[in-house]
Structures are given as structure tokens and as C-alpha cells.
Image (spheres, rainbow, N blue to C red):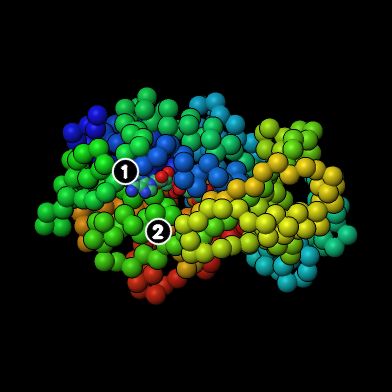
Amino acid sequence: MLPEKSEVVVIGGGIVGVAIAHELAKRGIDVTVLEKRFIGSGSTFRCGTGIRQQFNDEANVRVMKRSVELWEKYSREYNFSFSQTGYLFLLYDEGEVETFKRNIKIQNKFGVPTRLITPEEAKEIVPLLDISEVIAASWNPTDGKADPFEATTAFAIKAKEYGAKLLEYTEVKGFIIENGEIKGVKTNRGIIKTGIVVNATNAWAKLINAMAGIRLKIPIEPYKHQAVITQPIKRGTINPMVISFKYGHAYLTQTFHGGIIGGIGYEVGPTYDLTPTYEFLREVSYYFTKIIPALKNLLILRTWAGYYAKTPDSNPAIGKIDELSDYYIAAGFSGHGFMMAPAVGEMIADLITRGKTNLPIEWYDPYRFERGELRTAALQMG
Ligand SMILES: Cc1cc2nc3c(=O)[nH]c(=O)nc-3n(C[C@H](O)[C@H](O)[C@H](O)COP(=O)(O)OP(=O)(O)OC[C@H]3O[C@@H](n4cnc5c(N)ncnc54)[C@H](O)[C@@H]3O)c2cc1C
């Protein structure tokens, strides 16, 4: 049964919706998550596990520093796997080195301990790397990875313990709006009364905005990105997330099960199609084996696809939309929403409970597109 009413309704039960509900419930707010399939069934369970603070602007560095603090805290308290095995960006020419030196300066200024290291040092971290063309690397040992299934489930269980309701197979179909105020949400299972809604549907966000009659232009489009997993190999073989922009914008690391997981920049869209392609299989094999030649000997077990919900500047839209009270959005994560989720939970909970937040949320202002104030594009992997 649907509850008759809820103080806050979060639409979307991915890591972002669940993290928001968790934070609100922890603060004693009556919150309900509506998820059209099952918890985590969107991009979240298809994601590449990576959590990094190596961004190229103040806001993302600060938000991700906070997010990593929360990943550390909650993985300890709720007992799910999060490991700080670092992110290693391989650099191949002076131009790349200059860009990363600038990024490292911003990161260091806000307390993220990234440093430029030599190819030999990079090889000490990942002995199987081919460093013949690498001239330097950007290394932050406090970046890391978490299992998306485990993490989302852990946050969901805790959110419930704090009193949140998480309703699966409950699809939002429309809203009840009177004089610019939300009165309720219509679902395939009936109506739930509420005054506060959070759109956390990422790749589907524009459909929910349309249902709510939002006129503000918030361009978020679904793009197909693919990933691969190999047979498991000895634990500890590739600890950090290894990135190579030169070789196809590739990212790869080893999962807790031992398989090598990763993807490349190869992008199709805008589309809601999710069929993996042969071309991706060929390209990912080529690029991965350029970075780590030993991968030539590994079997590929499976490929799959998921959405990057992309905005024009690769930064999400996070904030309150004033034309409808009370409507919030946290969507358009452009391929790095898993890592941001704990901090986004905090930002949205702050907005709802205190009307403001100490994190630099203005960077993600949903109004920036209409105003033509695009941000510096966030570093996007994959
Ligand atoms: C191949 C790949 C690799 C990635 N790698 C990384 C990475 O290494 N690190 C990282 O941080 N991010 C990564 N990402 C991005 C990451 O997966 C997303 O940014 C993140 O999962 C977004 O979470 P979300 O909760 O906003 O969205 P989702 O997980 O997509 O959740 C949205 C939910 O809304 C539900 N929904 C939609 N419409 C309705 C409706 N009408 N009613 C009710 N429910 C509805 C959906 O069913 C879905 O469960 C990757 C993505 C892909 C595809």
C-alpha cells in the first residue's frame, strides 16, 4: 500500500535518491522514495565504481572532498566496501602535464593531496603498466572505489531504519498542482499527498520535469556508455582506477571480486537504447591492452551499457526550482553521480531542512543553462 501522505517525496531510487532519503530520514524528516523498478536499477548498478576528488574546479573538488569523508564514515558505520586505492591519471605530453599541474594546484588548495609523480613511481603502484610513452602521472591516494550494489543497498537499509519508506515498482505518472503548489504525486499505485518533491531520476529527469510542467530549460539527455568485466585475477593486481585520456579516455580498475572493470569514451546518443555494441568490444580491447599489455591474456566475460545523463557542461543540476513550490532537482550527473551521491544527499537535505548549505551548491544552479552561464566542463571519464 502507498502511504496516504509523506512530508517529502523523492522520485528515483538510485544512489542519489537513496542518499537524499537517507540524509533526510536521519534528520527526522518523513520521506518516501518512489522507484519505478527496484532500488538501484537505473545507472547506479551499471556504473564503474569510481570515486575521485581529482576535478578541475573549486566546487567539484570541495564537494568531492566532503563526499569522500562521507563515503569513509558511512562505509565504516554501515559496513560496506569502500577502499581508498587511489586514482592514477597517465599523462603522455607536456600539454596534459600543464593541465594536470593546474588541476593539482586547485586540489591541493582545498586539501586533496594529489601529486605529480614519475612514470617509474606509477609503475610501482601498478607494476603491469606499460610506461614507455608515459611522461608523468597525477596520483591521489585518497580517491577510491565502492561496490555500487552493496553501497546503495546499505544506504537503503539504513534509510529505512531511520524511518524512510522506499517503494519499489511504483512509477510516478504525474502531479497534483494547485496555484503553483504541489499537493500530491500520482503513481501507478495511486496518489500520495505531499508538499515537497525531489526529482532524482537522472536520465529520466526531463520527463519528470515535463510532468510537473516546469518551464525552466534544464537540458539533460541520456547517452549510452558501455562497460566490460574480465575473468577474475589475483587480488591486488590493479588497485587504483587507472585513467588514460590518450588511449580512448579509458578507465579501468579491479573489482573486489577480482575482475577488471572499466570503459572508454565511446558514446552513443542521445538515446534510451542500452544494447552493447561490437564496436565497443573492439575498441575497449585495443585501448586497455595499450595501457596494460598483460590484459591480452584475459577473457572478457561480459559487456553491458548504462546511461550518462549529460548536461552541456557535464555538471549536474542541483537545487530548488522556484516556479513550483516545493520542487527540487538533483540530476544530470554526466557520468560521475555515484561518487557525488553522499554529498548531494547532504546538500539537498540542507536545502530542505535549513534553506541553505555550506557546500558550494551554486555551481550546480539549475538556472545556469537558461542564463547561458555554463561552467567549466567537469573532467569526464569514460
Ligand atoms: C558504464 C558507466 C560507468 C560509470 N562509472 C561511474 C563511476 O566510476 N563513478 C561514478 O561516480 N559514476 C559513474 N557512472 C555514473 C553513475 O552511474 C550515475 O551518475 C549515477 O548512478 C546516477 O545515480 P542516480 O541515482 O542519479 O540515477 P539512477 O541510478 O539512474 O536512478 C534513477 C532512478 O529513477 C527511476 N525512475 C525513472 N523514472 C521514474 C518514474 N517515473 N517514477 C519512479 N522512478 C523513476 C529509475 O528507475 C532509476 O532507478 C557510470 C555510468 C555508466 C553508465
Locate the C terminus and report the quarter of the image it occupies: bottom right
Q: Quadrant of residue 280?
A: bottom right
- Residue 25: tell me if it is visible: no
Indicate the amino acid at tag 1.
Glu
User: Contact, CB < 8 Å: mark 2 with mark 1?
Assistant: no
Q: Name the residue nearer the viewer: 291 or 112.
A: 291
- With 153 as the anchor, is 173 left or right in this view? left
Q: Does residue 160 appear left or right of residue 50 in this picture?
A: left
Give the SS element for disc 1: loop
Going 48% across and 31% down the picture, which residue do you hit? Answer: 153
Residue 315, percent across and down? 48, 61
Q: Is residue 104 left or right of residue 213?
A: right
Residue carrying label 2: 317
143, 227: nearer the viewer: 227
Pointer 1 local density, CA inside 10 Å: few below 14, some 14–19, many at least 20: some
Q: Amino acid at mark 2?
A: Ala
Q: Quadrant of residue 14?
A: top left
The number of numbered badges drawn on the structure is: 2
Residue found at the very far right of the displayed protein: 132
Name the spot of residue 246 as percent of width and height, x first.
74, 64
What residue occupies the far left of the structure in this picture?
Answer: 179
Residue at x 18%, y 45% (from the top left corner):
184
Identify the residue shown where x is 56% and y is 53%: 275
Task: Please provide percent x and percent y for residue 236.
Answer: 77, 35
Q: Report the disc number at residue 171.
A: 1
Label located before the other in sequence (2 or 1):
1
Ligand 1 contact, mark 2 (Cβ < 8 Å): no
Mark 1 and ligand 1: say if the CB distance to the nearest ligand atom is below 8 Å.
yes
